Image (cartoon, grey):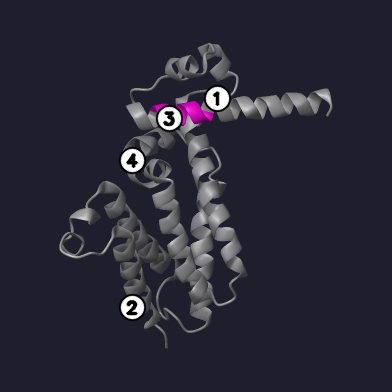
Amino acid sequence: MGLKERKERERQEMRGTILKSAYRLFVDKGFDDVSIRNVAEAIEYSPATIYLYFKDKNEIIHALHRQGFSLLNKLFQPLFKINNPFDRLCEMGRAYIKFAIKNSEMYKLLFIRSEPMEHLASCQNQDWDEGDRAFDALVQTVAQCQQLGYFKNLDTHQFSMTIWSFIHGLCALRLSGHLGRVKEERESNKKLDQIMDETLKTFTLAIEKLKK
């Protein structure tokens, strides 16, 4: 490995260390209560070192969002081997729920907590490829379903948003603890995973009927 390659590897490793520490601090303390100095102290470097990799806290948050969406896209990508788009759509719903439960704090960072979005408003000139790619995967699948007669006369993007809103709502109820307080969970032997799975199945059965 040459000097240039080694320096680049070390640079990426340091970026990863900064992001990992910042993410932990954001989760533990909240976004507004974490400063660049806090991140520097966590990795035992000076604040000047952080600025060599990120110009400010907003850029760190933006990088974490890209990281989270990249992980979600990795779950979606193999599903495009499923030829039937409606079957793929169902699996995408399951993959999304799995991502939310397994990466609950990252999910909250991406889709629930409002503070990151306030910070990200200042990052409008930065690319958002990973976030766009995640939603585009859903839109593409819905469009292919429509070619087979599903969801006719419905706007592709709006119906994609409807699907995402439902799945997100289910995940948000689970992560916030509200789902654990529903009567079905309290008065039966059903576990939260079973309730979520059955709710998703009911939703997919309902939208499956939107075929002409």
Q: Amino acid at mark 3?
A: Arg
Q: Secondary structure at mark 1?
A: loop
Mark sitting earlier along the chain (1/2):
1
Which residue does the numbered mark 2 point to in the structure image? Answer: 206
Residue pictured at 45% horizontal, 15% vertical = 37
The secondary element bearing badge 3 is classed as helix
- From the top left corner, tell me how far across and down residue 75 is, in percent: 54, 56
Magenta-colored span: 19-25
Q: Is residue 208 above or below residue 43?
A: below
Q: Which residue is mark 1?
A: 54
Circle nearer the viewer, 1 or 2: 2
Q: Residues within 10 Å of mark 2 (few under 14, many from 20)?
A: few
Residue under pointer 3: 24
- Mark 2 vs mark 3, CA separation in Å: 40 Å
Q: Secondary structure at mark 4?
A: loop
Q: CA distance from mark 2 to mark 4?
A: 30 Å
